[in-house]
Amino acid sequence: MEQLIELIKLACSYIKVLFTKIINGCLNFFKNVVGWFKSLQLQQGRDVPFIAKPNQFKEMLKKAPVKNVGIFQGVYNEETDEITHNEYIEADELDEKTRQILGNEEIVILS
């Protein structure tokens, strides 16, 4: 798992276009995170969905935050060793489920 997290960090440094979404209100894990991943029709065994605290990607973001909190979500393709989908979400607050899943971790691989 640690090796996969390091590969994700490395692959993130090559993202050329960063998609940003701003939520006025509370980020809802099931609506905003799970819903986004479901819309991508990912392939199990190839695509690795993950979320991360944005401070992990400060270099990549290169912009001042608009809202109080945020998360970076993306899909790492193990076959091509690249991030195939990404989105940076800023919100006024995170819901309890998102805070619980992230906990003290910088990057969390979702399954």
Image: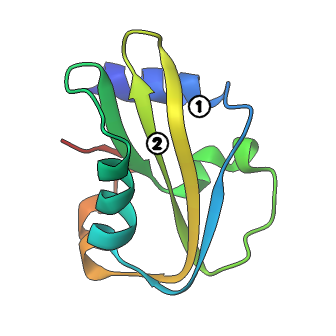
Query: In this image, 16 relative to 98: left or right?
Result: right
| Label 2 with label 1: CB-CB less than 8 Å | yes
**Which amino acid, mark 2?**
Gly
Q: Quadrant of residue 107?
A: top left
Residue lying at the far top of the rendered structure: 79
Can you see residue 107?
A: no
Q: Quadrant of the N terminus?
A: top left
Q: How far apart are marks 2 and 1 (CA)?
A: 9 Å
Q: Residue at x 29, y 19 (%)?
A: 46
Q: Where is residue 61 in the image (x, y as percent from the top left)?
A: 73, 50
Q: Residue at x 73, y 70 (%)?
A: 65
Residue 2's place in the image compared with 20, above or below, is: above
Residue 88's place in the image compared with 6, above or below, is: below
Q: Mark 2 points at which residue?
A: 74
Residue lying at the far bottom of the rendered structure: 25
Nearer the viewer's eye, disc 2 or disc 1?
2
Look at the numbered disc 1 and give the secondary structure of its residue: helix
Q: Mark 1 points at which residue?
A: 12
Q: Which residue is drawn at 52% across and 28% down?
A: 83
Q: Quadrant of residue 30?
A: bottom left
Crowding at dot 1, Cα within 10 Å, few <14 / some 14-19 / many 20+, comes out as some
Query: In this image, 16 relative to 13: left or right?
Result: right
**Which amino acid, mark 1?**
Cys
Q: Position of residue 75 (x, y in %)?
A: 42, 35
Q: In which quarter of the image is the C terminus?
A: top left
Crowding at dot 2, Cα within 10 Å, few <14 / some 14-19 / many 20+, comes out as many
Number of the label disc, if any, that sits on residue 56: none
Q: Which of marks 2 and 1 is nearer the N terminus?
A: 1
